[in-house]
Amino acid sequence: MNIDSKLPNFRGLSPAQRLKHIAQAANLSDADHALLGNPGALSLETANGMIENVIGTFQLPMAVAGYFQINGRDVLVPMTVEEPSIVAAASFMAKMAREAGGFITSSTGPLMRAQVQIVGVSDPHGARLSILKHKEELVQLANSRDKVLIGLGGGCKDIEVHVFPETPRGAMVVAHLIVDVRDAMGANTVNTMAESVAGRIEEITGGKVRLRILSNLADLRLARAQVRYSAETLATKEYSGEQVIEGVIDACLFAAIDPYRAATHNKGIMNGIDPVIVATGNDWRAVEAGAHAYACRNGRYTSLTTWEKAGNGDLVGTIEMPMPVGLVGGATKTHPLARLALKIMNVHSAQDLGEIAVAVGLAQNMGALRALSTEGIQRGHMALHARNIAMSAGATGADIDWVVRKMVAANDVRTDYAMTLLAGSRDA
């Protein structure tokens, strides 16, 4: 199915008009259209089956980022998030990227790690070799617990053993089951496999198994994206394209060398990634944990992206990071809007989804760095935040747009100023 991801004048449409456009562009059914427009799409009954102690449901805005072209294919990207300017920034940078062919992505296979912690061994290096000697047996034992996954080509593929000879509690050995989880996020699968081999590992090593749990540092399950912008594309009224490029490169270097900046830099990347993960019912906490751990893989916290100048002067951005997401299991299958989000994106594998997510993260990072290195972040962000400010001040109906226009024109987006404007209009 070919999709046109361009969304011209989308901001000027009403929510109902936007929904109609997306339903047509993504070839959604009438039932899908009705479900997306239903504020109670997640029924209380479904919610009660998803988690414990349910008393209600809590909604967040669901939007669509447009203009994304990934590996030559147009993609509409559902994003669920509460913060203004995120969707607009991602869409704008995706639109600018189309001139040079959009985003190019790739990924590794869907490999996850399950860790089995062994304590109480006096010969940890010997225990390591004993486990490796029995590797094939342990792999077969792990795979005996999930015949469906094996039939799909997945399953436990290898075992690594890590030795920590000196800890405050004595020697510790940790076996890693390397599992191809196919289109699942994989937590339940790898946890089950880890538990299945625990008893046999105790017999092999003479030690005591403690934890049997996945690792959220999914460093064998990476997604990558790259993008290119010409100087001509990046030029603004106030700045030349070359100035923008130099500013973005300096901003990225700042994040690369300073963890205080890197934390905010990477948060901006996750501003793009997390809304895609949430919209598709995936575990955004797992993705966040893996991202920040990966940013420390060389011993210090640094940037997840790089921005550099190509030989012809273009700005080239890249990202590579863990992306443990799935299309099957959990809320991705249970939540009706998560299923629709996947349908809108027209994704066919977990790797596809991961690659889209990192492309959005790269676009979001570029939007932030471009603003920070030129006019500053507040000008554009606060203009988009003005509607929230107006409503929090008590504006309703037509007053919202009027107050927004006044605040933006005055470059003064504050709740107390909005209240002053509203008070003046009511006294007039």
Image (spheres, grey):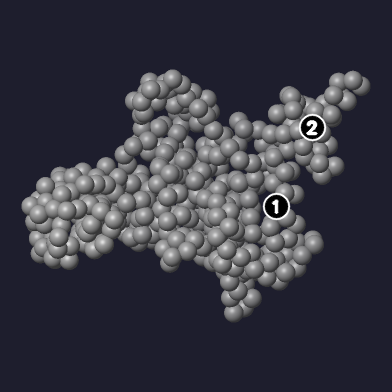
Secondary structure type for disc 2: helix
Q: Amino acid at mark 2?
A: Asp
Where on the picture, by quarter, is residue 299?
bottom left
Q: Residue at x 17, y 62 (%)?
A: 124
84 with respect to 4 (left or right): right
Secondary structure type for disc 1: helix
Q: Residue at x 44, y 20 (%)?
A: 55
Q: Amino acid at mark 1?
A: Ile
Please provide percent x and percent y for residue 35.
47, 28
CA neighbours of label 1 inside 10 A, class few (<14), some (14 to 19), many (20+): some
Instruction: Note whether residue 179 is visible.
Output: no
Q: Residue at x 36, y 51 (%)?
A: 216
123 and 346: which is toward the camera: 123
Residue wearing tag 2: 416
Mark 1 or mark 2, which is nearer to you? 2
Q: Residue at x 47, y 25 (%)?
A: 57
Where on the picture, by quarter, is residue 109?
bottom left
Q: Earlier in the sequence, mark 1 or mark 2?
A: 1
Residue wearing tag 1: 377
194 with respect to 8 (left or right): left
Question: Distance from label 1 to label 2 (Cα)?
Answer: 21 Å
Q: Residue furthest right?
A: 428
